[in-house]
Image: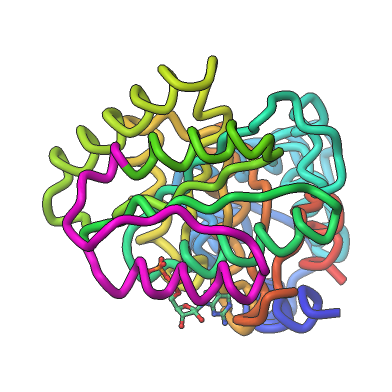
């Protein structure tokens, strides 16, 4: 399984560190807890989430009087599973689940290079495979290459794309995409957006404008705002999540490049710290390399 292989580096780095840490010790004491804090932070779990985990493990050690280092793995796993956002009340992320709106409007945001276009292509493919009619919108008009790339993915997935010339008004493209989806009777429209971070204020204003325009066309649109983060960038992903969740009304996260990174711990940090569910994970560059995120499976995969 791809995720399993993908998590191998995270797993071995994480457990390698914990194993070295408890070597020659029987009991979880303050020293072990200090070291555990260090291991979690350097495993890209994030400072806030690490402190919460440590606090819970500490409480556990105190109430149980004696906790052996052998039990530590299981305790950490339990704590992580509890901390990660419970997404059972969310709309099911499975591609064949019923969509609550028609068209269901999904806006995809994130900085350049994280895998936004690739993720949109993979999602289009999966929705189509599930029998849904999909339209893509190329509202990242800032880079000519972005439109071309999305075009390639539209072709691969076999779905129509609404686009305008490089430099066109992104909100106009978003409007046209939603309009096209409505008149075609499509089920889903997935809109790509620009991701240049150097003009942060400008970008957030642009995203708000795109949202407003789509909302005028279809009630409640966009119904989902997915933030794509590159897991292999570790703490950068956490910083980006901070900026986008503050100003872009993010409803779900996509963590890409979980294949072959040792920074998989970031998945735990982002979902806990921002209280936004992880919906999908990217485990490769191919069209089938997108998985619906399964919290339980992920935690188990990390602790195998
Ligand atoms: P965008 O600028 O955010 O639209 O990023 P792209 O979709 O163009 O992706 C940037 C690079 O990351 C490309 O080379 C993709 O093939 C690669 N990529 C995207 N998702 C994944 C993933 O899950 N795993 C791996 N290994 N590469 C990915």
The image position of residue 15, as x and y in percent, is: 71, 75
- Is 266 colored magenta in this rendering? no
| Range covered by the magenta-colored residues | 143-172
Residue closest to the eye, 187 or 252: 187
Q: Which of 261 and 95 is in front in this view?
A: 95
Q: Which of 196 and 85 is in front in this view?
A: 196
Residue 197, position as x, y percentages in the image: 21, 55
- Counting from the top left corner in percent of width and height, residue 282 is at 64, 68
Q: In this view, does 140 lie to the left or right of 271?
A: left
Q: In this view, does 275 lie above or below 283?
A: above
Is residue 231 shown left or right of residue 109? right
Give the image location of residue 136, x and y in percent. Answer: 53, 53
Q: Residue at x 62, y 84 (%)?
A: 260
Q: Is residue 197 visible?
A: yes
Q: Does the magenta stretch include residue 164?
A: yes
Residue at 75% across / 33% down in the picture? 87
Q: Which residue is drawn at 78% across and 49% down?
A: 295
Instruction: State the scheme by which the image is colored.
Output: rainbow
- Is 84 drawn above or below residue 114 in the view shown? above
Name the residue: 80% across, 63% down. 69
The quarter holding residue 171 reads top left
- Whether residue 274 can be seen here: no
Residue 84 occupies quadrant = top right
């Amino acid at each position: 399984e791809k995720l399993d292989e993908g998590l191998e580096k995270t797993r071995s780095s994480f457990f390698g560190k914990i194993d070295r840490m408890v070597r020659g010790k029987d009991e979880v004491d303050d020293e072990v807890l200090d070291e555990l804090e260090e291991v979690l932070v350097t495993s890209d779990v994030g400072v806030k989430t690490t402190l919460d985990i440590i606090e819970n493990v500490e409480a556990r050690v105190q109430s149980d009087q004696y906790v052996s280092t052998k039990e530590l793995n299981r305790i950490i796993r339990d704590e992580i599973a509890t901390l990660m956002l419970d997404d059972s009340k969310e709309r099911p992320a499975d591609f064949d689940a019923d969509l609550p709106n028609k068209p269901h409007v999904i806006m995809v945001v994130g900085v350049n290079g994280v895998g936004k276009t690739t993720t949109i292509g993979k999602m289009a493919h999966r929705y189509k495979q599930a029998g849904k009619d999909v339209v893509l919108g190329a509202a990242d008009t800032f880079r000519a290459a972005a439109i071309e790339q999305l075009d390639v993915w539209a072709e691969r997935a076999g779905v129509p794309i609404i686009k305008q010339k490089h430099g066109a008004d992104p909100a106009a493209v978003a409007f046209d995409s939603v309009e096209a989806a409505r008149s075609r009777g499509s089920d889903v429209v997935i809109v790509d957006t620009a991701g240049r971070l150097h003009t942060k204020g400008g970008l957030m204003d642009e995203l708000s404008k795109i949202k407003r325009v789509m909302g005028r066309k279809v009630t409640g649109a966009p119904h989902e705002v997915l933030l794509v983060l590159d897991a292999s960038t570790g703490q950068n992903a956490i910083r980006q999540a901070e900026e986008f969740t503050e100003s872009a009304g993010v409803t779900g996260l996509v963590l890409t490049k979980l294949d072959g990174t040792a920074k998989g711990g970031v998945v735990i940090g982002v979902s806990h710290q921002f209280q936004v569910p992880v919906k999908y994970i990217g485990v490769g560059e191919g069209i089938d390399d997108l998985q619906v995120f399964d919290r339980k499976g992920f935690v188990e995969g990390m602790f195998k």
